[in-house]
Amino acid sequence: MQIRLASDNDLDNLVPLFNAYRQSLGSASDPIGVREFLAARLTENDSVIFVALDEHNAVGFIQLYPSYSSLHLKPLWYFDDSYVTPAYRDHGVADLLAGKAMELAMETDVLCVRRTLVDANTSVVLDTETGDRSIYQVLAQH
């Protein structure tokens, strides 16, 4: 399994994954819209996308969006998008993707990588200050 930064060359592999991800959350299939959205993210370089590849097949991804903490005077990243194809779930792919996100955060001095859940009053956090690699650590928001 290879985990690496996605590029424009990965667009054909990412579109079906991202479309399936959106459908799993109740959105209608929209491969054209997905292609335009992902192409813009990759071209404008306003997000970081890691892709998981088994051979040459994309089987998962995580997308990070930058933000900043004025309190800590450091950047932080939110991940709103993460998906692994059903056939590759429970094989550690999500952990590998989260690990790559954490690795890049540590290399670039990012305060944390956080996922804010839409329907709950909690966040899932990867904390670079403690070195905690668990993407499943749940912290209550205040």
Image (spheres, rainbow, N blue to C red):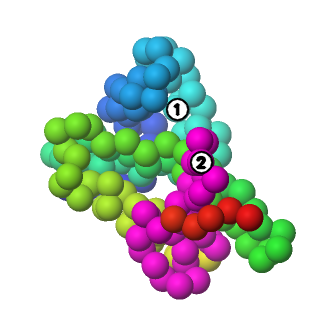
Circle 2 crowding by C-alpha within 10 Å: few under 14, some 14–19, many from 20: few
From the image, tell me which residue sits under label 1: 38
Question: Is 46 rendered above or below residue 12?
Answer: below
Residue drawn at x 44%, y 64% is 135
* Mark 1 or 2: the one toward you: 2
Residue lying at the far bottom in this picture: please name it.
130
Q: To which quarter of the image does residue 17 belong?
A: top left
Is residue 40 left or right of 29 when viewed as pictured? right
Amino acid at pointer 1: Leu
Which quarter of the image is occupied by the C terminus? bottom right
Amino acid at pointer 2: Ala
- Residue 19, visible in the rendered structure: no
Residue drawn at x 62%, y 65% is 140
Towards the viewer: 79 or 35:
79
Residue 11 placed where, x, y %?
41, 32
- Disc number placed over residue 73 in the picture, else none: none
Q: Is residue 96 magenta?
A: no
- Residue 97, visible in the rendered structure: yes
Tell me the element at label 2: loop
From the image, tell me which residue sits under label 2: 120
Residue drawn at x 30%, y 49% is 52
Magenta-drawn segment: 110-137
Circle 1 crowding by C-alpha within 10 Å: few under 14, some 14–19, many from 20: some
Tell me the element at label 1: helix
